[in-house]
Image (tube, rainbow, N blue to C red):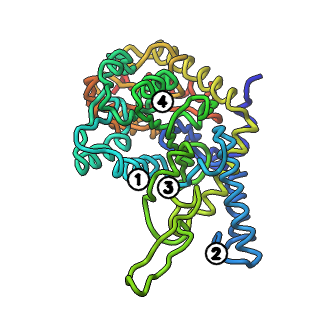
Amino acid sequence: MTLDPYKIREDFPILKRRINGNPLIYFDNAATSQKPRQVIEAIVDFYENHNANVHRAVHTLSQEASELYEDAHEEVAKFINAKGIEETVFVRGTTEAINLVAYSWGRRNLKRGDEVLVSLMEHHSNIVPWEIISGIRGSKVKYVEVDDDGALNYNALEDLISSKTRIVCISHVSNVTGIVNDIKRVAKTAHDYDALILVDGAQSVPHMPIDASDLDVDFLAFSGHKMLAPTGIGVLYGKRELLEQMEPFQGGGEMIREVNFDRKAKSCSIVWNSLPWKFEAGTPHISGGVGLMEAARYLKRVGMDRVKKHEEMLTGYAMRRMRECCKSIRIFGPEDPSAKCGIIPFGVEGLSSHDVALFLDNYGILVRSGYHCAQPLHERLQLSSSARASFYIYNTLEEVDRFTEVLKETEQL
């Protein structure tokens, strides 16, 4: 049974907007998704009826807020099949989750001579933290090649990994080409060399069923705002035994159980809080957690298998229509839509990606343009930039038809 995007669209107030006099066609979902009324109302309800700080007081509002925030962790743990809330740390997003691992794990475990493997398809947030921490610790970042269509070169990975490798950092789905990596294969390769694996799940968790335990990943980072939730909330999944061994990323309130001052030694002794709170210093994004909980529930009701199938259908249809409508359009990445996840990078001959995006915006069609925070991949593919159309549960075939009709008009520019 397929999902009904027309029924789903009724839950998204923003889709009733018009841009430059045209109905809004939102094809920038890889950057951020729109929010359903259910998520918006859950956040409003929190502020109107339950607003208080969590884990701080015994009064009614604090107890209610704490219960909601803990329920949010439980809901997310179930969504990705973690073993419990101890394995789901709430952060600001994928970027902070990766930085948490780089600093909390990398600062203690990387040393001179160690190697970190990163693929050339990575978002900058899965490159820059590893370059920074390796500069501090004296380790070396090595880059795994991709093929001419942007696909991961598994042979290159298997040739590059060695006893010096401490962690492999890779995206589940490329935010540029949409290609889906075989994470179970990469995880096995990493573990065969006693290395860890960190997966950037920003483009996979919102779009397909994810079972973190079955994938056997050590860390999985993802953002709420790409899966119907608010901005500023995300998740780091980590195997419990690893998180227990790691030191906190930030210090302050909430992440400690005790701070005792020794008057004789004139120093404080500190006992960390239990998981996941050990990594959630300060007042958290409570309303964001509530929104993320409702977003996970919404997607579960829709069904992640149906989400994946809907996007595969739209991607295949859009790629066919784009090739038919205009000879000057070039689609980058793999040609097989079943190898992709709802993302189509493209270019129009003679126009920059920003020119294309601005032209489409005149007709109310919103796409991304530029490097998409993945400059090394663009350089590998010999692209100065790309335009990117990306789909989600509320997009329709009629929107794709309108998109390709307008694209055809770029031939007249």
C-alpha span from label 4 to label 1? 25 Å
Q: Please give left or right for residue 40 compared with residue 200 in the image.
A: right
The quarter in which the N terminus is drawn is top right
Task: Please state the horizontal and vertical placement of residue 336, each as a whole percent of the image.
Answer: 49, 13
Q: Which residue is mark 1?
A: 104
Chain-order first, disc 2 or disc 4: 2
Whether residues under marks 4 and 1 lie with C-beta atoms below 8 angstroms apart, the answer is no
Chain-order first, disc 4 or disc 3: 3
Q: To which quarter of the image does residue 386 belong?
A: top left
Residue 32 visible in the shown view = yes
The quarter in which the C terminus is drawn is top left
Q: Which residue is mark 3?
A: 92
Query: Secondary structure beneath disc 4?
Result: loop
Q: Amino acid at mark 1?
A: Ser
Q: Which residue is depicted at the point 48% across and 71% down?
A: 270
Task: Please state the horizontal and vertical placement of residue 132, each as a whole percent of the image.
Answer: 27, 49
Q: Which residue is mark 4?
A: 173
Q: Which residue is depicted at the point 64% across and 30% down?
A: 209
C-alpha span from label 2 to label 4? 39 Å
Residue 180 visible in the shown view = no
Q: Amino acid at mark 4?
A: Val
Chain-order first, disc 3 or disc 2: 2
In front of the other: label 3 or label 2? 2
Above/below status of 397 relative to 207: above
Q: Amino acid at mark 3?
A: Arg
Q: Which residue is depicted at the point 56% across and 54% down?
A: 90
Whether residues under marks 3 and 2 lie with C-beta atoms below 8 angstroms apart, the answer is no
Query: Secondary structure beneath disc 2?
Result: loop
C-alpha span from label 3 to label 2? 21 Å
